[in-house]
């Protein structure tokens, strides 16, 4: 099978992917109370410390304050952005593109992943094509997308769908192929008809892999959003960053980056919570 | 109460080893079964012209060394291994695909991880078109039978190996198969659990009507359970000898120290030792 592809999915073991939080891994020796408290304290201080250091550096005169504005300036820019009413529309436009592209791309990916995973003929037909297209970074399609779709929303959607599709397709394909043969044999012996075999055994068996693919696709949809909005548009968080850059509003640029980071962080967390509920038997 | 109990009341009168009667059609007829696998080292004869009958209600154990083709024979009877040469009739009709009147318990429990114990057991009846309520009632009966009432809503990964295998047996019984095939179902269990499971199976067997073919490589297990033991030889798999086990029933693992039992075991071991020597000399000279 596709070796590189397998590595992608296996690097993120389905079992753990949904629950990894990084901070306190199980299996580590429980440190003494004093150290644990110290760890918590340092953890809580991490971001405030960083912000204070940033503020001090910016105002110290070592760096150009216009190019490297302190957090207070960034915060002011963000407040202004919100007050102007643009913030809402920018976030709405970006969220719409990400969500629509993610849903469409995932639906196509799951559907075709089941088909290629289940039917060798379909796999022989489509897998070589997908394997050639998959490694091309979606950003590389920006020029042709502009030619095809101009500045329309369809072009933006296309880019995000393109980015999401291959990841979800591949993880579904692998998931379907990795369904325990023993389970299929057991189901056959119990008289499971074809349709139920797909719904009750193969889909659920592949679900942990599909969920990992979908989670990766969440962050991919944000990458491709950047490309899509840089390709030219009239609203959106990344679009706002670009405009601010052209006007040398560095505070606004950084505020935009922070907003983008926060949104994709929330999306990832939400998806992780959802994923844990999806694979309910774990 | 659903159909299950009413049929189990008519439990087979099996307190004595069953006697093959001429008039009765065997539950399983295997004639000249040969199976050849294509491997990267060429063709490999896994099973070579194996023939045997199993009477209705009989409990037959197949023993033999690892790799002699026991699983292959069982899978073929189950309809999971096609194509094959020869003829297999189960309840008079030829097999070629899985059939709901043939139940199978594998060496691994292969429970559906996303289904609770009850839903695992209800799966078969559901697939055969029973309503969720009927299937649930069948499952509840069987759960009581295997003594896992407390775990009816548990998921398989929270059960011990022995409990999982009990659920797998109940799941196979839920379709009321005429023929139950068991492929080393207790192979992965520890000695104590295994003995308990054997006693459980004998009890269950008194309550169901199924004909049972049970694969194992443990001679003790075969003699405790079976009416008849088929000893297979390796490379290619053939049936070497057939030994009737005329020990009284009900049996339990307590018979392991009876003199009649020991005599039977000695017979089996002699056959196996002779075959082992033959195979050894053959491989030495070739
Ligand atoms: N799908 C297959 N393709 C090729 N060879 C196979 C296949 N299945 C089984 N074999 C070979 O057929 C022979 C019999 O295998 P089988 O699994 O039936 O043995 P077994 O008696 O059940 O052994 P064990 O006691 O270890 O379970 C083995 O040599 C095995 O390598
Ligand atoms: Mg085997």
Image: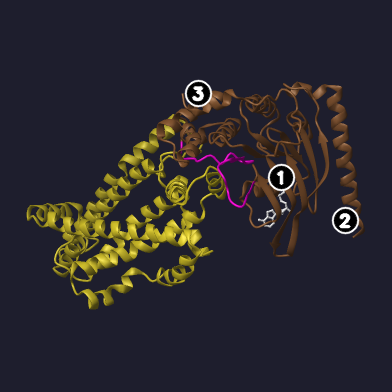
Chain colours: A yellow, B brown
Look at the picture and state if A142 lies above or below B258.
below
Residue at the disc numbered 2:
B283
Disc sitting over residue B29 in the figure: 1
Q: Quadrant of the C terminus of chain A?
A: top left
Is residue B218 visible in the rendered image? The answer is yes
Secondary structure mainly formed by the magenta segment: loop
Q: Nearer the viewer, residue A122 or A105?
A: A122
Q: Position of residue B188 (x, y in %)?
A: 66, 37
Give the structural element (helix, strand or loop) at label 3: helix
- Ligand 1 within 8 A of label 2's CB? no
Same chain check for tags 2 and 3: yes
Mark 1 close to ligand 1, CB under 8 Å: no
**Would residue B104 be counted in the magenta stretch?**
yes
Numbered range of the magenta stretch: B93-115
Pick whichever of labels 1 and 3 is earlier in the sequence: 1
Q: Is residue B199 left or right of residue A158?
A: right
Q: Is residue B102 left or right of residue A124?
A: right
Disc 1 or 2, which lies upstream in sequence? 1
Residue A281, position in %: x, y? 44, 38
Chain hosting mark 2: B
Could you tell me which residue is drawn at 44 percent across and 69 percent down? Answer: A126
| Residue A207 falls inside the magenta stretch | no
Query: Given contact means CB atoms under 8 Å apart, are the residues at marks 1 and 2 in contact?
Result: no
Which x, y percent locates residue A205? 47, 48
Determine which residue is flagged by label 3: B149
Q: What whole-number distance in Å separates the C-alpha atoms at marks 1 and 2?
A: 33 Å
Q: Quadrant of residue A246?
A: bottom left
Q: Is residue A201 left or right of residue B272?
A: left
């Amino acid at each position: 099978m596709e070796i590189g592809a397998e590595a992608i999915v296996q690097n993120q073991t389905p079992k753990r992917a949904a629950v990894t939080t990084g901070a306190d891994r199980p299996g580590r020796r429980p440190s003494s109370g004093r150290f644990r408290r110290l760890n918590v304290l340092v953890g809580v201080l991490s971001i405030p410390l960083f912000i204070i250091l940033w503020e001090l550096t910016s105002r110290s005169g070592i760096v150009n304050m216009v190019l490297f504005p302190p957090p207070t300036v960034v915060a002011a820019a963000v407040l202004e952005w919100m007050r102007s009413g643009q913030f809402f529309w920018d976030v709405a436009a970006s969220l719409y593109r990400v969500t629509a592209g993610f849903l469409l791309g995932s639906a196509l990916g799951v559907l075709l992943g089941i088909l290629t995973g289940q039917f060798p003929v379909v796999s022989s037909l489509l897998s070589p094509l997908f394997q050639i297209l998959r490694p091309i970074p979606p950003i590389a399609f920006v020029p042709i997308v502009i030619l095809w779709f101009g500045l329309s929303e369809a072009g933006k959607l296309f880019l995000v769908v393109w980015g999401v599709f291959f990841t979800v397709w591949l993880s579904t394909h692998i998931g379907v192929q990795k369904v325990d043969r023993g389970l299929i044999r057991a189901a056959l012996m119990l008289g499971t008809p074809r349709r139920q075999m797909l719904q009750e055994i193969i889909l659920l068996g592949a679900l942990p892999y599909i969920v990992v693919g979908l989670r990766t696709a969440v962050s991919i949809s944000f990458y491709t959003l950047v490309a899509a909005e840089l390709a030219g548009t009239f609203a959106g968080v990344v679009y706002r960053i670009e405009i601010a850059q052209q006007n040398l509003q560095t505070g606004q640029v950084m505020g935009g980056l922070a907003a983008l980071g926060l949104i994709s962080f929330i999306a990832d967390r939400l998806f992780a919570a959802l994923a844990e509920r999806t694979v309910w038997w774990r | 109460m659903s159909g299950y109990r009413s049929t189990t009341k008519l439990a087979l009168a099996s307190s004595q080893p069953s006697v093959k009667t001429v008039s009765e059609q065997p539950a399983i007829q295997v004639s000249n079964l040969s199976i050849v696998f294509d491997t990267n080292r060429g063709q490999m004869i896994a099973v070579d012209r194996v023939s045997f009958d199993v009477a209705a209600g009989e409990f037959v154990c197949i023993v033999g060394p690892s790799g002699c083709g026991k699983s292959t024979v069982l899978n073929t009877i189950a309809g999971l291994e096609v194509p094959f040469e020869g003829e297999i009739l189960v309840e008079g009709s030829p097999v070629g695909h899985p059939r709901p009147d043939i139940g199978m318990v594998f060496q691994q429990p292969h429970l559906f991880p996303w289904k609770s114990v009850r839903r695992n057991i209800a799966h078969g009846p559901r697939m055969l078109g029973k309503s969720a309520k009927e299937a649930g009632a069948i499952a509840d009966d069987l759960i009581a039978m295997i003594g896992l009432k407390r775990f009816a809503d548990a998921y398989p990964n929270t059960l011990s190996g022995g409990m999982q295998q009990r659920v797998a047996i109940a799941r196979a019984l839920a379709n009321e198969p005429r023929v139950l095939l068991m492929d080393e179902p207790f192979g992965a269990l520890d000695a104590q659990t295994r003995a308990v499971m054997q006693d459980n199976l004998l009890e269950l067997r008194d309550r169901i009507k199924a004909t049972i073919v049970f694969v194992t490589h443990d001679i003790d297990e075969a003699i405790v359970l079976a009416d008849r033991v088929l000893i297979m030889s390796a490379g290619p798999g053939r049936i070497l000898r057939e030994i009737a086990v005329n020990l009284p029933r009900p049996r339990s693992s307590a018979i392991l120290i009876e003199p009649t039992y020991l005599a039977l075991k000695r017979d089996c071991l002699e056959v196996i030792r002779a075959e082992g020597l033959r195979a050894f000399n053959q491989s030495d000279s070739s």
